[in-house]
Image: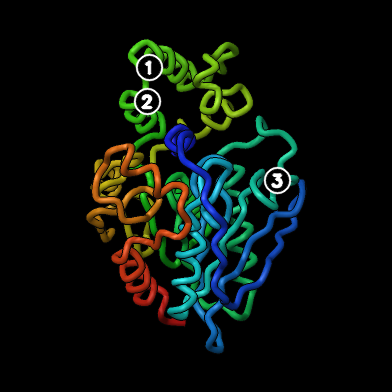
Amino acid sequence: MYLALALVLAAPPAADVPAPRLLSELVELKTDTGVLYGTLDLPEKTGPWPVVLLHAGSGPTNRDGNGPLTRTDNLKMVGRALAAKGIAVLRIDKRGVGASTPALAKEEDVRVETYATDVLAWAGLLRKDARFTKLGYIGHSEGALIGLVAAKDAKFDAIVSLCGPGRPLQTVLREQLKRGLPDELYKQSDTILRELEAGHTVKDTPKTLAALFRPSVQPYLISMFKNDPAKLATGVKAPFLIVSGSTDIQVSATDAKCLSDANTSAKVVTIEGMNHVLKTVPKTDRAEQLPSYSDPALPLHPKLMPELVGFFQKSLGGK
């Protein structure tokens, strides 16, 4: 979530790691305000194939799972691993991020509905492509909430919440901020959150909280605060997989339980020793967590892909 930025402030930069060879292609989606870009990871064997739309989490996280302060390659790894098992994956740079940056003129113009509308457009593009059969969705972190907002109209054939929130964002943020801020600064953040919950923007915010509460991002936060992931989950009729990590220090197991309580037909999996960026980190200590946010050479947790592959092979296997 948003505190990923704070979490990696002290993380050292990672060296570039050569990418393995894989069949892929660049994809463009034209919109009224600019072009959105993505990468299709394609199976080597002849199609048609099922396809999964993979959406990144909060902030400036790109299609690979990386940002200005993070380098994990986690989403690239997920896409390629699914493609290796016969499931095509479209990883996208959301509006305002990466190659899709010019499609968002001003940060203050974006809302959660903006991203949900883009998801619908990407889904429509994939459904028109004769190479693909059924359509699935994976939302990582905040991307899971965006997928739930879009799900009713997108009519996914299967959906995965991967370390996604199960409570309103402001509740999760309060929990994160309470753990990470001094008491006085937390009180200031709580005051700001209360104003945003009421639909009011806040002009003066502490410089130390600018990354989270800068004026240009407040309209987006207000739109997010209006959505309860658990309530949205009740409307999911497609096969639904909820994946959490036992050492995720950004989104807790409570969130997975909220989603599963709301949708009792969902499959719930907690992966022991997996953290928020999908890597193996046995402990929740900050010092133990930090390296995984800046080392793309670290592989995904070994139990993650078998769960995703098994779920999609079962739910998207038929034409």
Q: Is label 2 in contact with label 1 (beta carbons under 8 Å)?
A: yes
Q: Please state which amino acid type lies under the numbered disc 2.
A: Leu
Badge 1, how many Cα within 10 Å: few under 14, some, many 20+?
some
Between marks 2 and 1, how big is the CA–CA gap? 6 Å
In the image, residue 237 above or below residue 215: below
Label 3 sits on a secondary structure element that is helix
Tell me which numbered mark, 3 or 2, is placed earlier along the sequence: 3
What residue does disc 2 label?
Answer: 177
Determine the residue positioned at 66% across, 30% down. Answer: 108
- In the image, 213 versus 22, the foreground residue is 22
Task: Measuring from the top left, give residue 306's x and y in whole percent.
Answer: 32, 71
Q: Is residue 46 left or right of residue 137?
A: right
What residue does disc 1 label?
Answer: 186
Determine the residue positioned at 58% across, 62% down. Answer: 123
Q: Is residue 219 left or right of residue 319?
A: right
Determine the residue positioned at 43% across, 12% down. Answer: 188
**Colouring:** rainbow
- Labels in figure, total: 3
Q: Please state which amino acid type lies under the numbered disc 3.
A: Thr
- In the image, 160 versus 82, the foreground residue is 82
What residue does disc 3 label?
Answer: 101
